[in-house]
């Protein structure tokens, strides 16, 4: 499942540079996560990088974008290839 940023976001930008897939972008009034790019850092870490750095714990699983670990790995591979 990809992640989402809740309305509790304080726009601190801590997550912005941490995302290896470039899935996080600025939107008004907070930040957003592009579900098509979010891989939950499946190949890079035991926990998503954005979750680890968020000071207000506002990054949660997105119930509208449920994906299996296999789907997340496949998405990561495709993004790595530039597809």
Image (cartoon, helix red, strand yellow):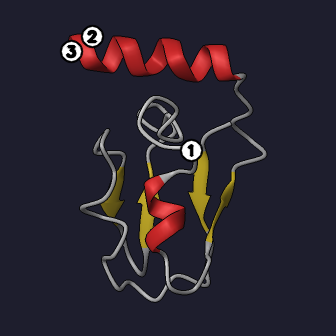
Instruction: Read off the residue under disc 2.
Output: 83
Q: Nearer the viewer, residue 80 or 28?
A: 80
Depth check, mark 1 against mark 2: the one in front is: 1
User: Whole-percent x and y of residue 19?
Assistant: 34, 51
Q: Nearer the viewer, residue 15 or 32?
A: 15
* Residue 79 horizontal side relative to residue 38, left or right: left
Disc 1 is placed on an element classified as loop
User: Whole-percent x and y of residue 28?
Assistant: 38, 76
Q: Earlier in the sequence, mark 1 or mark 2?
A: 1
User: Whole-percent x and y of residue 6?
Assistant: 62, 72
Instruction: Read off the residue under disc 3.
Output: 82
Q: Quadrant of the N terminus?
A: top right
User: Whole-percent x and y of residue 2?
Assistant: 60, 40
Judge the density around disc 1: few (<14), some (14-19), many (≥20) Cα neighbours within 10 Å: few
Q: Residue at x 45, y 29 (%)?
A: 43
Does 82 appear above or below 4?
A: above
Does 45 appear above or below 16?
A: above
Q: Quadrant of residue 31?
A: bottom left
Disc 2 is placed on an element classified as loop
Q: CA distance from mark 2 to mark 3?
A: 4 Å
Judge the density around disc 3: few (<14), some (14-19), many (≥20) Cα neighbours within 10 Å: few
Instruction: Read off the residue under disc 1.
Output: 46
């Amino acid at each position: 499942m990809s992640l989402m940023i809740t309305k509790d976001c304080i726009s601190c930008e801590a997550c912005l540079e941490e995302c290896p897939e470039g899935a996080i972008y600025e939107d008004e009034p907070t930040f957003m996560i592009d579900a098509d790019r979010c891989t939950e850092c499946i190949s890079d870490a035991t926990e998503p990088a954005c979750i680890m750095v968020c000071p207000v714990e506002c990054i949660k699983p997105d119930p509208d974008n449920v994906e299996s670990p296999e789907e997340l790995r496949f998405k990561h591979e495709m993004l790595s290839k530039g597809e």
